[in-house]
Each structure stands twice: as structure tokens, then as C-alpha cells.
């Protein structure tokens, strides 16, 4: 059973849109197209066996098979999302692929994650979320505070300053924003910052950014 911490009160118009509309086609359209990039994200995040990984804005759990393999038998995944329908898909995926026992799913407002999550993750991974979520800067700040010092934080998302027709279609279909610079807080706050376009040989639009939260003095 999905942990309903926050429940329906946490749902915004956009999360209801994902519940009622996007959840019906998300996996069919996105899973295969983004599998390589999600695998690359887990590689860049340098997840270690036994890590606690926060999958922020986890949606239907497309990151989680890759994370589950990386954290090993002793590691755990925390998946946070506001859409109950997307979390139901994530739970079904976990049961089918055999990692449900290491996964905690939480429905709630990501800006209030300090009230929903009682432990500090070793890694934070968020994919295709900052371009969709409201008040993404507050969401980043809340998750960055939660991250253990020395932990790594990764963002995969879209960034089109001048979106073409195809980009505009995707933006509308997934209720996203074209030019959310979700990589900037990492660039400004983290050590060992790294950025790449994905795939590397196409016009910029999709990126992966990762960095390490400095150790406390």
C-alpha cells in the first residue's frame, strides 16, 4: 500500500492533471525513450550499496529499477510525488520487478518534504520534475537541506530557451515549462559540479547535472 502521507490535500491542479490524464499515457510514451538517460543518471550519481536514495518527483517509478539495483540488498529508495495515480504505477512496477521491500512511496507536497521524510538521504535524484512542479526553487531548497553533507544531487530535465515545435508539443502534453534552469542551484551550491546534454550529439534541450553537497565545517 502506498504511504499516503499528505494525501489528497497535497494535490494541486497539476498533480490532478497527472492523476486523471498523464498517468494514462506516461509510461507508454516516456519509459523506453528515457531508459538510457535514467541509466546514465544512476551511473553519474555514484550510488553505493546500502545508500538511501530520494527519488524526488518519482512519478511512475521509472528511475527505481536502476536505483534498486545500485543500492543493493541493504539500500533503500524513498519515492515522493503528489500524484496518487502515478505512485500506484510505481508500486505496481516495484512489485513486478521485486524491489518493493526496499521502496517507500510517499504522496505529498515536495515543498513540505521535511514534514514527510524523517531521514536524510545519501543521494537525491530528480528527473523531468523541476520543469513540471510549481515553485521548483523551494522544492530544490527543501531537498538540498535534507541531503546528507557530502551526498550527491542529480537533476535530469529539459531546458529550451527558444523551444521548437516538437518541444512545444511536449511542454503542452506534460504541463511543463520550457526554460526552468534546474541545473543552476547545483552549479551554485555544489562541489564537483558536472553538466552534460543528453544525448550529447543533439541540439541542447535535455540535460543531466550533478554535484556533491559540501561537507559541513
Image (cartoon, rainbow, N blue to C red):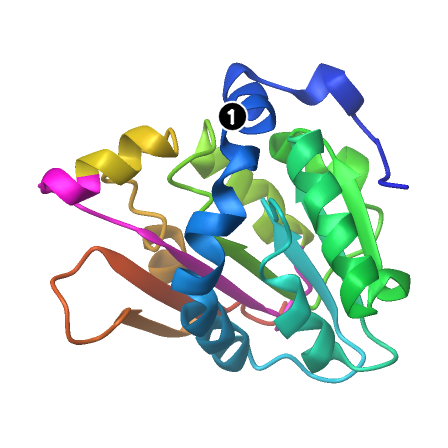
Q: Nearer the viewer, residue 97 or 211?
A: 97
Number of labelled discs? 1
Q: Is residue 173 visible?
A: yes
Note whether 61 is above or below 114 in the view shown.
Answer: below
Residue 152 is a magenta residue:
yes
Q: Mark 1 highlights which residue?
A: 21
Note whether 51 is above or below 6 in the view shown.
Answer: below
Note whether 60 is above or below 112 in the view shown.
Answer: below
Q: Nearer the viewer, residue 125 or 118?
A: 125
Report x, y in % for residue 82: 65, 31
Report x, y in % for residue 155: 44, 58
Q: In this image, 32 relative to 178: left or right?
A: right
Q: Is residue 190 visible?
A: no
Note whether 145 is above or below 124 in the view shown.
Answer: above
| Element under disc 1 | loop
Mark 1 crowdedness (10 Å alpha carbons): few <14, some 14-19, many ≥20: some
What is the quadrant of residue 84 in the picture?
A: top right
Report x, y in % for residue 50: 81, 79
Considering the image in quadrants, where does the C terminus appear?
A: bottom right
Name which residue lies at 58% across and 20% down. Answer: 16
Name which residue lies at 78% across and 50% down. Answer: 91
Which stretch is magenta?
147-167
Residue 30 is a magenta residue:
no
Name which residue lies at 28% across and 58% down. Answer: 206
Name which residue lies at 51% across and 81% down. Answer: 43
Q: In this image, 35 relative to 83: left or right?
A: left
Report x, y in % for residue 37: 41, 70
Q: In this image, 1 relative to 16: left or right?
A: right
Considering the image in quadrants, where does the N terminus appear?
A: top right
What is the quadrant of residue 53 in the picture?
A: bottom right
Q: In this image, 186 relative to 62: left or right?
A: left
Amino acid at each position: 500500500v502506498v504511504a499516503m502521507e499528505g494525501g489528497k490535500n497535497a494535490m494541486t491542479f497539476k498533480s490532478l492533471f497527472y492523476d486523471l490524464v498523464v498517468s494514462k499515457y506516461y509510461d507508454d510514451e516516456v519509459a523506453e525513450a528515457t531508459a538510457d538517460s535514467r541509466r546514465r543518471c544512476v551511473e553519474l550519481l555514484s550510488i553505493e550499496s546500502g545508500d538511501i536514495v530520494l527519488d524526488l518527483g518519482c512519478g511512475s517509478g521509472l528511475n527505481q529499477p536502476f536505483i534498486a539495483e545500485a543500492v543493493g540488498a541493504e539500500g533503500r529508495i524513498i519515492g515522493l510525488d503528489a500524484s496518487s495515480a502515478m505512485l500506484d504505477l510505481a508500486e505496481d512496477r516495484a512489485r513486478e520487478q521485486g524491489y518493493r521491500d526496499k521502496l517507500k512511496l510517499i504522496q505529498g507536497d515536495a515543498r513540505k518534504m521535511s514534514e514527510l521524510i524523517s531521514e536524510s538521504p545519501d543521494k537525491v535524484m530528480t528527473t523531468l520534475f523541476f520543469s513540471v512542479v510549481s515553485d521548483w526553487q523551494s522544492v530544490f531548497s527543501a531537498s538540498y537541506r535534507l541531503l546528507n553533507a557530502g551526498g550527491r544531487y542529480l537533476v535530469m530535465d529539459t531546458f529550451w530557451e527558444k523551444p521548437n515545435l516538437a518541444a512545444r508539443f511536449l511542454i503542452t502534453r506534460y504541463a511543463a515549462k520550457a526554460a526552468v534552469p534546474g541545473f543552476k542551484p547545483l552549479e551554485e551550491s555544489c562541489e564537483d559540479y558536472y553538466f552534460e546534454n543528453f544525448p550529447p550529439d543533439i541540439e541542447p534541450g535535455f540535460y543531466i547535472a550533478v554535484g556533491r553537497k559540501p561537507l559541513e565545517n
